[in-house]
Image (cartoon, rainbow, N blue to C red):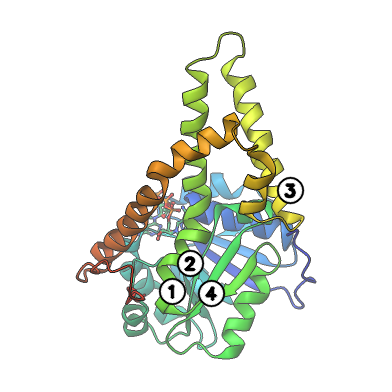
Amino acid sequence: MAPGAPPLQPGPTVGVVGLGRIGTVFVEAIRRFAPEAAVVVAGRDQARTREAAALWPGVAVADLRGVAEAADMALLCVPPEAYRGAVFAMAPAMGPEVILVSVTNAVSLDDLGRWTRQPVVKIIPSPAHAAGRGACLVTPGPRAQAQHVERVTALLQRFSRPVLTDPADSRIASNLAGCAPAILGAFCGSFLEANAARAQVFSPAELRALITESVAALAALLDQGLTFEDVVARTATPGGTTEAAIRALMTQGPALCERMVDATFHREAQLLGIPPPRPDPAEPRAAARG
Ligand SMILES: NC(=O)c1ccc[n+]([C@@H]2O[C@H](COP(=O)([O-])OP(=O)(O)OC[C@H]3O[C@@H](n4cnc5c(N)ncnc54)[C@H](OP(=O)(O)O)[C@@H]3O)[C@@H](O)[C@H]2O)c1
């Protein structure tokens, strides 16, 4: 999906607190795909934040209070353990219509609702937004009304595919939207290494280019409407080498994926300080809230 939503009128002022991995993704996405929005950023180290902000035209730098005063919506792109302090520093300076946007499942919406009187919206982004791609999960939190969700969604539509997400499915949706690029990237890296270990003539860079092109080709085929299963069926000739590789993958792949999903549920429960979920694939899961 290429970003196609019309420019926002008027363009909002978006506050980005924390210019680490995901904060940087948002600034890049907004500058590239929503130039009508103003951006004001805050970080712990003002000099470093100014240096980082100088990479993009028209990005202002402020402290937490300055972001709270200037922004129409404030994206908290800091680690979960820094949320409480950041919200307490910003909340008194925020007007009643300023939307506090959480980008993490590891701070519960209930906690955020207790720490601030602002409307809260949770979004789970993907690093793909910097390229104008990726699903962004949107969950209304305390005091968020339809108009607040619409304002956040209108911005996200400029560089992503916003998907309204019920908290009950928040974890699995986050796995498939936010985590998947990294998980698929890690798999491709391992597959690349296993092949590179047997290379005789190709350089590592040439082999990397081959799998990179394959991933882009897969995305193009999916964009044309093919399913994963279609791609497998088109590629894996019965009795051939691809089929042999997929059969090897399938001996461990499904169990491995189940373990990976379990790991995400357990880690999220740890971060939220709630009991780990009991695995029972036969029953719909009672998902961690937040
Ligand atoms: N990375 C992703 O793809 C992704 C996806 C979905 C959600 N998230 C969520 O996004 C949040 C940030 O993750 P990240 O991967 O971007 O982490 P990160 O790369 O470590 O960046 C965190 C940023 O927050 C800043 N920071 C830390 N404490 C702060 C404070 N008290 N006040 C102001 N700034 C502070 C850090 O500043 P310093 O540079 O000074 O340390 C850093 O710039 C997390 O809550 C995570 O769950 C991330």
Q: Quadrant of residue 238?
A: top right
Q: Nearer the viewer, residue 121 or 162?
A: 162
Q: Quadrant of residue 268?
A: bottom left
Residue at 77% x, 70% y: name it: 5
Name the quadrant where ligand 1 sits.
bottom left
For label 4, the residue is 138
Marks 2,1: beta carbons within 8 A:
yes
| Of callouts 4 and 2, the N-terminal one | 4
Amino acid type shown at disc 1? Asp
Question: Spatial distance from mark 1 to mark 3, Cα to Cα?
Answer: 28 Å
Q: Left or right of 20: which side holds 59?
A: right
Marks 3,4: beta carbons within 8 A:
no
- The mark tally for this picture is 4
Question: Spatial distance from mark 3 to mark 4, Cα to Cα?
Answer: 26 Å
Looking at the rendered image, the disc whose residue lies closer to the viewer, 3 or 4, is 3
For label 2, the residue is 173
Amino acid type shown at disc 3? Ala
Looking at the rendered image, the disc whose residue lies closer to the viewer, 1 or 4, is 1
| Badge 3 density bin: few <14, some 14–19, many ≥20, Cα 10 Å | few
For label 3, the residue is 220
Marks 4,2: beta carbons within 8 A:
no
List the single residue furthest toward the front. 239
Marks 1,4: beta carbons within 8 A:
no
Residue at 60% x, 59% y: name it: 60
Marks 1,3: beta carbons within 8 A:
no
Q: Nearer the viewer, residue 91 or 205?
A: 205
Question: Spatial distance from mark 3 to mark 2, Cα to Cα?
Answer: 22 Å
Q: Say above or below: 216 vs 137.
A: above
Amino acid type shown at disc 2? Ala
Q: Left or right of 188: which side holds 160?
A: right
Is disc 2's CB within 8 Å of ligand 1? no
